[in-house]
Amino acid sequence: MAGSLPRNRFLLTLIVLSGMHFGNIVFAQDHDFSASAEGSENQAPDFDLPGKQVNVKLSNSQGKLVYLDFWASWCGPCRQSFPWMNTIQEKYRSQGFEVIAVNLDAQHEDAQKFLATTPAKFTVAFDSQGQTPRQYGVKGMPTSYLIGRDGKIIARHTGFSAADRDKLEQKIQTSLETPQ
Amino acid sequence: MTACAGIQPVQPWEKGTLAKAEMTFEGDPLDNNFTEHIYFSKEGASGGSGVGGGGCGCN
């Protein structure tokens, strides 16, 4: 090598130090990732978020089967899922079933524009800070959780397509029939 | 350099700006469909062309 020894040693130290910090960046997953979604309890974390008119609290729906959906205005499959969620909310409302759709848009106006063209006949909450999806360990958009009458998470589903509809509805029907 | 350790990975719900049409490479949707189909049939490759359409950002 043509370089003098002190300069090479400096470069080497720089590279080694960068490597150490690289490990810290790559493996530093969100430290506030609570294990509650997949933890031993499986209890769905409660939340208190602004809704269309009043605040939406998960604990208010204790005793009902809850379909908790995380959505955003920019997510294509979310647009497809809304008519289906309208349908199932109406169909199973009398059996103690509630759809709660939590919007994750950073800008509230985007959510309002979406709702103007794709109306929601179910409970909508707004979490622009993204605290709730963090607690639930959301890995993709949209993600839905089926929460039992006892408040425990029964199932999680990431994404949404036409093929998912029947499968999801079957799961809801089975969960409604199961006594808890 | 130590400040870089505070960088958090982007969360799935924080990809709103990335989901905009301007953030994709292709201009014509039909042309894009052809290209993606060719990649799928020849390489078995899928996804990576844009967030939002695929929803979860994986495909």
Image (spheres, rainbow, N blue to C red):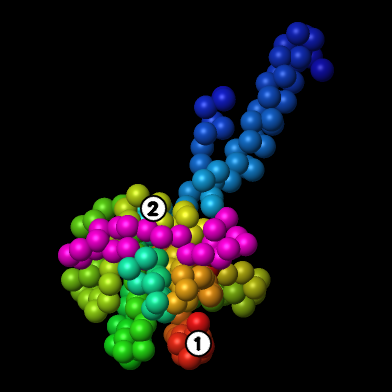
Residue drawn at point x = 41 percent, y = 56 percent = A132
Chain of the residue under label 1: A
Which is nearer the eye, B21 or A105?
Answer: A105
Give yes or no for residue A54 being in the magenta stretch. Answer: yes
Q: Earlier in the sequence, mark 2 or mark 1?
A: 2
Residue drawn at point x = 71 percent, y = 14 percent = A10
Mark 2 lies on residue: A130
Highlighted range, magenta: A35-58
The amino acid type of the residue labelled 2 equals Gly
- Tag 2 near tag 1, CB within 8 Å: no
**Residue B50 visible in rendering:** no
Give yes or no for residue B56 being in the magenta stretch. Answer: no
Mark 1 lies on residue: A179
Which is nearer the eye, B12 or A8?
Answer: B12
Residue drawn at point x = 51 percent, y = 88 percent = A178
Residue drawn at point x = 28 percent, y = 72 percent = A123
Q: Are marks 2 and 1 on the same chain?
A: yes
Q: Of helix, strand and loop, which one carries label 1?
A: loop
Dominant secondary structure of the residues highlighted in magenta in the image: loop
Chain of the residue under label 2: A
Distance CA(mark 2)–CA(mark 1): 33 Å
**Marks 2, 1: nearer the viewer:** 1
Within-10-Å neighbours for mark 2: few <14, some 14–19, many 20+:
some
Q: Position of residue A163 (x, y in %)?
A: 49, 86
Q: Of helix, strand and loop, which one carries label 2?
A: loop
Q: Position of residue B31 (x, y in %)?
A: 43, 72
**Residue A62 visible in rendering:** yes
Above or below, B6 relative to A107: above
Which is nearer the eye, A47 or A171?
Answer: A47
The amino acid type of the residue labelled 1 equals Pro
